[in-house]
Amino acid sequence: MHTGCTFNHRYVKSNPREVENATWMLTVFHCFGQYFCLHFEAFQLGMAPVYMAFLRFMGDEAEARNYSYSLEVGGNGRKLTWEGTPRSIRDSHRKVRDSHDGLIIQRNMALFFSGGDRKELKLRVTGRIWKEQQNNPDGGVCIPNLCS
């Protein structure tokens, strides 16, 4: 488990052509007193092999809307960025994947980001989680990390 609201996650695969295995990884984060799961999965999107990363919140959908996150992957002077609201853990990873609610990286782009001879996948997914500003019942604005 990772503690903190920023992360740097590596995904390495010696044979990136084996997308058909639908391999996936899960990392748990503890941030703002809550738990989040980072999913990284390889699968076929139609006929195209892709990788997808997304974040889920260990709680219900209403609580999840209190948070936002960003994911970034890149290399060779290029980067892709995704920003969104984490989905509740009550939504299956398949439901999130099938709705395409996350950072989707085509295999050719992933291999480009990996550099080298394009025979090994070496992706670094960085990201951060933050609390959304919410109206304070006292009439003020709650600034993240300053209100209780």
Image (spheres, helix red, strand yellow):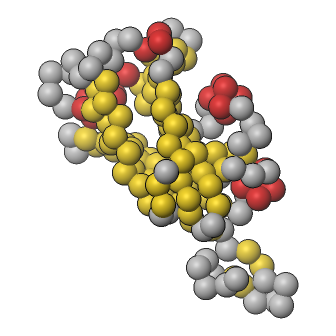
Q: Is residue 20 visible?
A: yes
Where 119 sits versus 96, above or below?
A: above
Residue in the picture at 75% in, 52% down: 59
User: Is 12 drawn above or below residue 142 in the view shown?
Assistant: above
Q: Nearer the viewer, residue 41 or 28?
A: 28
Estimate the x, y position of residue 64 in percent, counting from the top left.
Answer: 72, 55
On the rendered image, what quadrant is the C terminus found in?
bottom right
View extreme (front): residue: 1
Q: Quadrant of residue 92?
A: top right
The residue at 58%/45% (across/down) is 37
Q: Is residue 99 visible?
A: no
- Residue 74, how many percent across, how many down? 31, 42
Compared across the picture, whether 129 is left or right of 75 comes to: right
Give the residue displayed 60% in from the left and 51% down from the top. 36
For the residue pair 39 and 27, the one nearer the viewer reads as 27
6 on left or right of 101: left
Left or right side of 121 for 24: right
Count numbered badges in the picture. 0
* Residue drawn at point x = 78 percent, y = 50 percent: 61
